[in-house]
């Protein structure tokens, strides 16, 4: 197996860079490695594109990217969704220049080529000009090209730019159940993306963000100043006996004890996926909303509702592009820009059939935790940024992932468990990273 | 917009302008207690995340704070473990185009344009947009019922920031 990749003046030895319990600093800092990640991970594996509720009606489109490539999620008049490259078949101009909208057809701003929302060509001005040439309206290359593979799991649309590979359901494996749990929390069994989006620029490598989500050794340090302060201010302002408002219920658990986070536990699966929490999480002790519980019980029956609520996960990572918090109905999406630049999008979901209070709590959560201008996110970003700068130093070539190495519990069927303070999530992500970088992710070593 | 047509109107516009300038100055001078005291008890600070955002309840906001959350943010400013505030950012708020949109009894709505330069390290960040202040004219001075800071790129990609626009 070739592990040496010739990249310009240097060889990149993937096998050396990502070891079972440590990773080389250059995976975060090297522009060459970033380029390879785009090719071998982002433009090969399943990447989250959008939610079906963003293109509910025929004619709707939503513009995004897979790795570096601009794509469109569309709903055609046949009712089906498509993922198309956002590029005119003619001279390559993006067909859609904004973020979302509803149209009858896609018309290029440059020479007026018109396309259906399934990508098929409708017309070319002065079509006869192509008569007798090697190009014509019936040429498949005259259509907008579709992503090689796209599929939806319970409303979550992913696409892959590789012709071959595991199907979406197989690839999701054990973390599909996190999507199930979020959707099942809707009395009507359906979700809707709503309430706007944050686009938050991070001055760091994309992997710092995705690694941090199930790093349960950081909240009590990084978020001390917001979480402890929130506890203290609320106690002083409201007294110890007044129930804490929702905002304080959200901020306070970030400084729970190490044993609390240990008990949340970590779960890891193939392809770098995983989640923290399960039976409990930092979202488990929010106040009940009685109307919501009633709506759930009349939809599913008490026994089933107890099962649904018994699952309380923190972050679930669909490596490398997306992460959800099912228990509070938010999602963050990773958009890598450069080795040291990443944009994180935050979205919120409405549980269909649930009282508005649930959406309001999700919005409040997103404001407090995921906003670029708020109390929690900027301290995470500061830590990533300091890592980005610190790892430029020759202090050591290695980043350690040794915590609790060798003490994972194999639950069978590719499901690995460790206590919350373990480095399991990092090791598992780098196992997948290495497989993708070495063999395009086709075998999960 | 209400145009000042007499000396009384001009004086009122001047009072409102001076209030906005001094509020901004308190932010630049880190006079947090004085600044917090400008708000009514129900007063809110709102930085929407979309340009014509209908509400701060069912749509995300860069910041939406009542008195309690303002206290949390302000208390964090002096916390030695607030890492994203080290070094603490310096700001310069520039306010212009001050217009009184409505004035009924004690209730005054004022729009203005602002530019805030924030400098913490490396290069300064620029935050620009429009303020809408809902003020109450009471006891010879103003109190803020709501300060809304609508960044011109509020729905665009934002850098980290931990202070008030």
Image: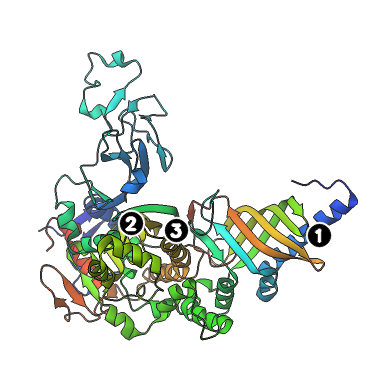
Residue A67 lies left or right of residue A443; in this view the side is right
What is the secondary structure assignment of the residue under circle 2? Answer: helix
Q: CA distance from mark 1 to mark 3?
A: 38 Å
In the displayed structure, A100 sits above or below B38; it is above
Nearest-to-viewer mark from 1 and 3: 1
Residue position for label 2: A31
Q: Chain of mark 3?
A: A
Disc 2/disc 1 C-alpha distance (Å): 55 Å
Query: According to the image, label 1 marks what residue?
Result: B15
Mark 3 = which residue? A200
Question: Do the numbered discs 1 and 3 sit on residues whose CB atoms are within 8 Å?
Answer: no
Kindly state the secondary structure of the residue where label 3 is placed: strand
Q: Compare residues B153 and A21 and report the one nearer the observer.
A: B153
Q: Pointer 2 indicates a residue of which chain?
A: A
**Quadrant of residue B119 in the image?**
bottom right
* Residue A8 visible, this orientation: no
Which element type, helix, strand or loop, lies under badge 1? helix
Q: CA distance from mark 2 to mark 3?
A: 21 Å
**Can you say which quadrant of the picture contains the C terminus of chain B?**
bottom right
Chain bearing tag 1 is B
Looking at the image, which residue is at 74% across and 56% down? Answer: B108
Does the rendering let one see residue A304? Answer: yes
Q: Residues within 10 Å of mark 2 (few under 14, many from 20)?
A: some
2 vs 1, front mark: 1
């Amino acid at each position: 197996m070739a592990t040496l990749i010739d990249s310009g003046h240097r060889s990149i030895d993937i096998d050396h860079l990502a070891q079972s319990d440590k990773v080389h600093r250059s995976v975060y800092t090297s522009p060459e490695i970033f380029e390879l990640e785009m090719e071998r991970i982002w433009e090969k594996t399943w990447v989250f594109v959008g939610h079906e509720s963003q293109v509910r009606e025929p004619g709707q489109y939503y513009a995004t990217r897979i790795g570096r490539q601009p794509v469109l999620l569309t709903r055609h008049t046949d009712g089906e969704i498509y993922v198309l490259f956002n590029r005119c078949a003619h001279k390559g101009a993006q067909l859609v220049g904004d973020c979302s909208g509803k149209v009858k057809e896609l018309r290029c701003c440059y020479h007026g080529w018109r396309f259906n929302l399934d990508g098929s060509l409708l017309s070319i001005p002065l079509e006869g000009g192509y008569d007798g040439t090697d190009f014509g309206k019936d040429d498949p290359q005259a259509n907008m090209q579709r992503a090689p593979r796209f599929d939806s799991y319970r409303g979550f649309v992913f696409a892959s730019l590789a012709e071959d590979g595991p199907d979406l359901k197989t690839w999701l494996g054990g973390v599909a159940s996190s999507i199930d749990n979020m959707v099942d929390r809707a009395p009507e069994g359906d979700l809707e993306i709503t309430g706007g989006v944050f686009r938050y620029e991070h001055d760091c490598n994309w992997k710092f963000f995705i690694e941090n989500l199930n790093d349960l050794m950081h909240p009590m340090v990084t978020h001390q100043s917001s979480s402890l302060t929130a506890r203290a201010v609320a106690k002083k302002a409201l007294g110890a006996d007044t129930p804490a408002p929702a905002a304080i219920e959200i901020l306070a658990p970030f400084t729970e004890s190490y044993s609390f986070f240990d008990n949340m536990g970590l779960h890891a699966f193939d392809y770098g996926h995983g989640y923290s929490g399960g039976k409990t999480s930092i979202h488990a002790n929010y106040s009940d909303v009685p109307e919501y519980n009633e709506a759930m019980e009349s939809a599913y029956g008490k026994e089933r509702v107890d099962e649904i609520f018994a699952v309380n996960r923190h972050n679930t990572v669909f490596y490398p592009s997306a992460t959800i918090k099912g228990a509070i109905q938010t999602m963050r999406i990773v958009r890598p820009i450069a080795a040291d630049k990443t944009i994180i999008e935050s979205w919120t979901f409405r549980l269909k059939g649930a009282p508005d209070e649930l959406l309001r709590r999700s919005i409040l959560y997103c404001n407090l935790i995921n906003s670029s201008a708020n109390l929690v996110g900027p301290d995470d970003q500061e830590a990533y940024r300091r890592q980005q700068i610190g790892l430029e130093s020759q202090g050591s070539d290695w980043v350690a992932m040794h915590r609790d190495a060798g003490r994972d519990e194999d639950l069978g069927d590719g499901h690995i468990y460790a206590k919350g303070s373990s480095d399991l999530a990092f090791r598992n992500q780098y196992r997948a990273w290495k497989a993708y970088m070495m063999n395009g992710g086709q075998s999960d070593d | 917009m209400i145009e000042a047509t007499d000396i009384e109107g001009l004086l009122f516009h001047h009072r409102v302008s001076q209030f906005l300038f001094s509020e901004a100055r308190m932010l630049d001078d880190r006079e947090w207690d004085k600044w917090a005291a400008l708000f009514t008890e129900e007063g809110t600070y709102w930085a929407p995340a979309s340009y014509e955002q209908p509400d701060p309840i069912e749509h995300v906001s860069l910041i939406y704070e009542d008195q309690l959350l303002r206290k949390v943010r302000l208390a964090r400013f002096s916390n030695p473990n607030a890492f994203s505030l080290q070094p603490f950012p310096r700001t310069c708020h520039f306010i212009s185009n001050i217009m009184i949109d409505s004035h009924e009894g004690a209730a005054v709505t004022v729009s203005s344009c602002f530019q805030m330069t924030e400098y913490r390290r490396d290069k300064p960040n620029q935050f620009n947009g429009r303020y809408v202040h809902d003020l109450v004219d009471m006891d010879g001075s103003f109190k803020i019922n709501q300060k809304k800071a609508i960044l011109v790129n509020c729905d665009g990609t934002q850098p980290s920031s931990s202070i008030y626009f």
